[in-house]
Amino acid sequence: MKLMICFSLVAHENEKAVMDQIENIRRFIKGDYFIVLYNGGPNKEFGNEVCLKYKEVKLCSYSSPLKYRKTGRVLYDVTRWLKSLNISYDYLVYLESDTMFIKDGFSRYLYKKMKGYDFMGQHWRKYNPKKDYPRSPGTKSMFKDWKRWEKYFKEKYFCKTSNPFQTYSYTIIQKILKIVDGENLEKLLAKSPVESLGEMIYPTLANKCGAKTRTYPISFKQYNHWKPELRKKDVKKALKKGEFMFVHPVKSNRVRDWIMKNAK
């Protein structure tokens, strides 16, 4: 198996926590990979120390400060930056600062599950705002602002997934970048009140490009959700069940330290 994974990691502050997360990736990801660190904080120097310490980490120069629950531009910035440098990969996996791996096997998992597929995500759903009912705060805000986004997508629907661990093939990313209307997307990102756009923009564009889509097992939801945050006892339970390779959200430093000391 020869597979190159690009992990897109968005972080805002605390380089020590980012380094802990990179050590987590180094421990549990077997095979070839690199990490694109997106600096979503106000400190322009954030991430420089990380990149000096870890040769597999690249700092996205298209990074810009992000507001809470406003990370919609990250995948757009990361993928067009990678393209500008002619950096190739097999799969791009989106990570956040509170994601953690707890077992190895993720590379083998992608190799097996992504064969013949272009996208894989958690809680993937297709919405028609004229017929369906919104199920989350982000979806509700998209329904309210749908007229603008309908004009942008030029479709009667949008797709939504959970941000962490959404996975795209290199091929579908290139197709997305060909149809992205960057000028109008920038205007929407600046004006639209929609939250969690990162869960909707690229999933919708991937579907528009004909992506063959699949989802992570529904059981993953038990230890991968928005809130509440996971405690040590939750991670212990996840470790006892063979199918869980990653968990989210892990915000406590004590839980993160416990994972690095006890997970195998």
Image (cartoon, rainbow, N blue to C red):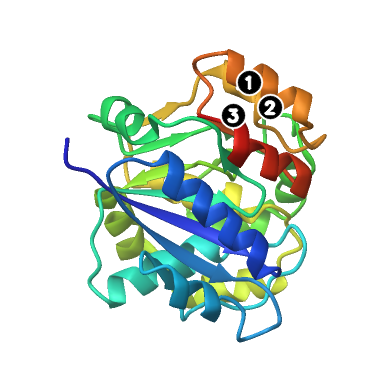
* Residue 71 in view, yes or no: no
Q: CA distance from mark 2 to mark 1?
A: 5 Å
Residue 235's label in the rendered image is: 2
Q: Amino acid at mark 2?
A: Val
Which of the two marks, 3 or 1, is nearer to us in this view? 1
* Image location (x, y in percent) of residue 38: 54, 69
* Image location (x, y in percent) of residue 116: 23, 30
Q: Residues within 10 Å of mark 3 (few under 14, many from 20)?
A: some
**Residue 132 occupies which quadrant of the picture?**
top right
Residue 123's label in the rendered image is: 3
108, above or below 34, in the image: above
* Residue 137 in view, yes or no: yes
Q: Residue furthest top?
A: 241
Out of 249 and 62, give the one closest to the viewer: 249
Q: CA distance from mark 3 to mark 1?
A: 19 Å
* Image location (x, y in percent) of residue 205: 43, 50
Q: Residue at x 60, y 14 (%)?
A: 240
Out of 184 and 106, give the one closest to the viewer: 106
Q: Amino acid at mark 3?
A: His
Q: Residue at x 61, y 38 (%)?
A: 261
